């Protein structure tokens, strides 16, 4: 039996797909290289925007047309949040959500044997614990993701995720340590801790995210620890100081902003002001002088006036982010913002997105130029061209060096590199003569 996996969305989804893949491999399945000859195709969906849902539906139809005999499985956030809509997609033989991923194997076996359609989307309650999942290898990847948290209690007015992921819950520290230990034994030097609302790790048990980072840092063989996206209101100066004392911690902070306008933040039901956000960025840069601070910015939220947008634009420029992910507001049924007055015309949203993206590109260029002259450790990844080796510095600057020998690979090796030039969205450098810093 062969199975093919398709993953949409965030790093948490990537992690969960790897865990599901491991489960199938351990039970006699082989992973197919393509969908056209697989016995089963599993689509792990995202529903963060309506565009995400559309891509999932298009993929389902494509798979059905290309491989009509395959058992098609739709799982993940989309069916969890919109069960009736997902259930109506007749191209999916099995429809299941984000809860109880361990049951997916038996559902597939049952579907293959009986060829009967199965819809099993179980609702979350408010007292869930984190489902026990682990992944012992990220094939072909130098860094490994470890999901340590799931769920969200924030209920931002535009977001469907609390409905697709349930309430906050965290992985026990012992399980985190055991999983990372196995990943390091498998050759991974960099660990990325991820979650749906990562900054809330341990909130239900009196622990904090920094406790998890410290526990991972004590594992022999962990060279780097990186964090996924963070909510700013849960990051405090005392946490930053503790993190600065961990040599393996990578100073890259992706702090979700959404808007630099306080009125818009209130309408979004975000739990901070622009001043509080800026103060946090100042603290990060004081404690981590070479940190990169990246973010997400939404434009065209209902009620956002031209003046509100310009205020957000000025805030982004003042904060000087290293990189910005810009996206126009997308209506999500089931959220408060979907019924708000003042919905913005699509043309205006596009114009604002283009303007914010242009600023983001300028700020990213300035950040890369600021890296010139520095000597940084770079963890090299699998080469995707014959001209350059490529990898990332601790602050997640993409660094390339010229390949003198096209057959030689630096994959999964760390070398100090002198950064000499900034080009487009990366830096170019040479390996330093000094490798024992």
Image (cartoon, rainbow, N blue to C red):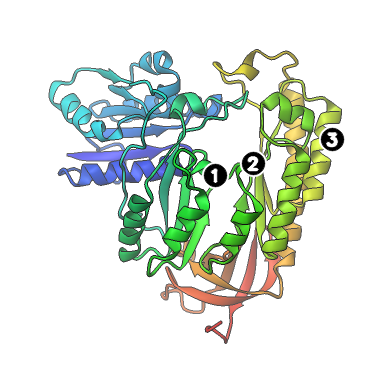
Residue 8's place in the image compared with 79, above or below, is below
Residue nearest the viewer, comparing 368 with 163: 163
Q: How many marks?
A: 3
Residue linked to disc 2: 233
Determine the CA span between mark 2 and mark 3: 24 Å
Determine the CA span between mark 2 and mark 1: 9 Å
Residue linked to disc 1: 199
Q: Earlier in the sequence, mark 1 or mark 3?
A: 1
Cβ–Cβ under 8 Å for marks 2 and 3: no
Q: Residue at x 60, y 64 (%)?
A: 244
Return the residue found at the far front. Answer: 206
Residue 393 is left or right of residue 97, and the answer is: right
- Tell me if I can see residue 300 in this picture: no
Foreground tag (1 vs 3): 1
Residue nearest the viewer, comparing 346 with 125: 125
Residue 110 is left or right of residue 7, and the answer is: left
* Residue 325 in the image, given as x and y percentages of width and height: 64, 43
* Residue 181 in the image, given as x and y percentages of width and height: 33, 61
Q: Secondary structure at mark 1?
A: helix
- Tell me if I can see residue 356 in this picture: yes
Cβ–Cβ under 8 Å for marks 2 and 1: yes
The quarter of the rendered structure image containing the C terminus is bottom right
Determine the CA span between mark 1 and mark 3: 29 Å
Q: Earlier in the sequence, mark 2 or mark 1?
A: 1
Residue 79's place in the image compared with 148, above or below, is above
Q: Residue at x 13, y 25 (%)?
A: 113
Residue linked to disc 3: 310
Q: Earlier in the sequence, mark 2 or mark 3?
A: 2
């Amino acid at each position: 039996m062969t199975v093919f996996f398709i993953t949409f969305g965030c790093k948490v989804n990537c992690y969960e797909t790897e865990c599901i893949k491991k489960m199938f491999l351990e039970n006699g399945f082989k992973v197919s290289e393509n969908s056209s000859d697989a016995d089963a195709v599993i689509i792990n969906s995202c529903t963060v925007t309506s565009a995400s849902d559309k891509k999932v539906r298009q993929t389902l139809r494509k798979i059905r047309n290309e491989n009509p005999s395959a058992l098609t499985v739709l799982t993940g956030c989309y069916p969890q949040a919109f069960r009736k809509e997902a259930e109506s997609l007749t191209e999916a033989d099995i429809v299941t959500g984000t809860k109880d991923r361990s049951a997916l194997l038996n559902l597939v076996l049952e579907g293959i044997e009986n060829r009967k359609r199965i819809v099993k989307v179980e609702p979350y309650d408010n007292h869930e614990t984190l489902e026990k999942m682990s992944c012992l290898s990220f094939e072909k990847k130098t860094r490994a993701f470890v999901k340590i948290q799931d769920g969200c209690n924030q209920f931002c007015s535009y977001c469907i995720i609390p409905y697709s992921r349930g309430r906050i819950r965290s992985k026990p520290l012992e399980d985190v340590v055991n999983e990372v230990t196995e990943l390091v034994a498998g050759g991974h030097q960099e660990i990325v801790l991820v979650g749906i609302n990562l900054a809330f790790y341990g909130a239900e048990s009196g622990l904090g995210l920094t406790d998890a980072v410290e526990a991972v840092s004590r594992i022999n063989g962990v060279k780097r620890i990186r964090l996924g996206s963070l909510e700013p209101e849960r990051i405090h100066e005392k946490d930053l100081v503790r993190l600065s004392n961990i040599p393996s911690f990578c100073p890259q902070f992706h702090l979700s902003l959404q808007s630099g306008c306080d009125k818009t933040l209130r309408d979004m039901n975000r739990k901070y002001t622009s001043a509080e956000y800026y103060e946090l960025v100042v603290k990060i840069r004081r404690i981590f002088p070479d940190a990169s601070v990246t973010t997400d910015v939404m434009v065209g939220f209902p009620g956002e006036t031209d003046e509100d947008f310009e205020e957000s634009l000025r805030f982004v420029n003042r904060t000087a982010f290293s990189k910005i992910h810009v996206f126009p507001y997308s209506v999500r049924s089931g959220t408060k913002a979907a019924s708000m007055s003042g919905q913005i015309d699509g043309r205006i949203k596009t114009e604002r997105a283009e303007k914010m993206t242009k600023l983001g590109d300028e700020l990213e260029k300035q950040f890369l130029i600021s890296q010139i002259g520095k000597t940084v450790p770079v963890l090299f990844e699998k080469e995707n061209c014959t001209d350059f080796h490529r990898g990332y510095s601790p602050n997640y600057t993409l660094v390339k060096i010229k390949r003198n020998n096209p057959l030689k690979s630096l994959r999964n090796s760390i070398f100090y590199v002198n950064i000499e030039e900034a080009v487009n969205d990366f830096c170019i450098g040479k390996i330093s003569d000094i490798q024992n810093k």
